[in-house]
Amino acid sequence: MSLTNVLQVVLKGCYAIAPLVRGFYQIIGSNTLNVKADKSIFTIADGAVQTLIFNYLLKGVFYRKIGEETALTNLTADPVNEIPAYTVDGLNIPAKFHTMIDRLILEMKGLTEEIKDSYDAYAAVLDPIDGTREFSTGFGEQCTICFGIVNKDGKSVGGLIFRPISDGNNMAIPETYAMGCPSEHFYQDTLVHAEQRIMGLLTSNGRVSPFLQDLIVSMQRLIPGFRQVCSGGAGNKILLLLAGFCSAYIQDRGLSNWDTAGAEAILEARAEKDPFSMGRLYPFLTDRTLVGYNYASVDENLSFIPGLAKLTAFNRASPETDISGYAMSINQVHPRANLQGLFAVYGDADLYFTGMQTISSVPEFD
């Protein structure tokens, strides 16, 4: 039984799906997206990709499949459960894509035959389009398909991050990826690597927390030329870190299991040859301990600490509620929210710990 084999089959599936994703990207608009209750964007690409991978490529492979999207999707010509054909969350998929989808369904079923062994001791975690806001606003090169394999103890044991649209550094390469399985000493990527690693902290394109703003200033005192590097998508940031376009990706807000499950295994596999570290920002912030997230497929949050994380529409158990403040009960938070932040760096992790000790602001951990 080889987890690397599963990753390679899923990679083939991603390559097959990539033209559909690029096609959806070209026609994105009000008729192909919805705004979810947590104010995040959902597109026909999100639902189609998750359905193709989970319902066809990986049907019956894992004991549980955990995906970000819960929308009703029907990609077949015959209505299922009274859902109209070729629809995603009530959005119609344009007719010009129907033949491509029919072909992809057959191709996904064929790829399943390449997975020979049983993987019922593992679960799969998927973000079908990570960075959907960027996907819907013309920054598709910052979007990825994030796939992770976790064992029943909740440890990330395999991962694939696939960028279906050119990364902008080399337009001749339409797709790039990184994947790894640490237990099998396997790591592989097709990334365009920086000639010399940029010393800087990756942050989102939008609001940056006061903690991260202060950390950048602190690190600039410790490392000459250290700077802020802005980009969208959690998976994309991990690829940029691996490729040398930054030296750290530290986040205290807005992440979930499907953003990081694959990334943990990939960075652990790469760390066999290069000095990469990844874990929760808390408790590293307090005692330099790096602990990964527990992705066990239970329906309660395994990173919850009373009073640590601020409640937001993204991490609340129900985004429709308007409760705010710090989460004091586990029933208030979404079971898949990463409530202790993220710490992923290349090089000396202790140097970042030193930088954190010199600032007064604290992480938001939302």
Image (cartoon, rainbow, N blue to C red):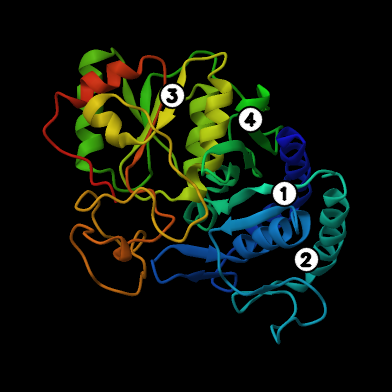
Sequence-first disc among 2 and 4: 2
**Label 4 – label 1 distance at C-alpha:** 20 Å
Mark 3 or 1: the one toward you: 3
The amino acid beneath tag 1 is: Ala
- Residue at the far bottom: name it: 82
Q: Secondary structure at mark 4?
A: strand
The answer to whether 190 is drawn above or below residue 328 in the figure is above
List x then y, in percent, for residue 351. Answer: 28, 16
**Residue on which disc 1 sits:** 18
Q: Is residue 187 visible?
A: no
Mark 2 nearby-residue class (10 Å; few <14, some 14–19, many ≥20): few
- Residue ID for mark 3: 277
Q: Quadrant of residue 219?
A: top left
- Residue lying farthest left? 360
Tell me the residue at 38%/44% (across/down). 205
Query: Quick one: label 3 or label 4, which is nearer the N terminus?
Result: 4
The label number, if any, that marks residue 97 in the structure image = 2
Badge nearest the viewer, 4 or 1? 4
Q: Amino acid at mark 2?
A: Phe
Label 2 and label 4: CA atoms lie apart by 32 Å
Mark 4 or mark 1, earlier in chain: 1
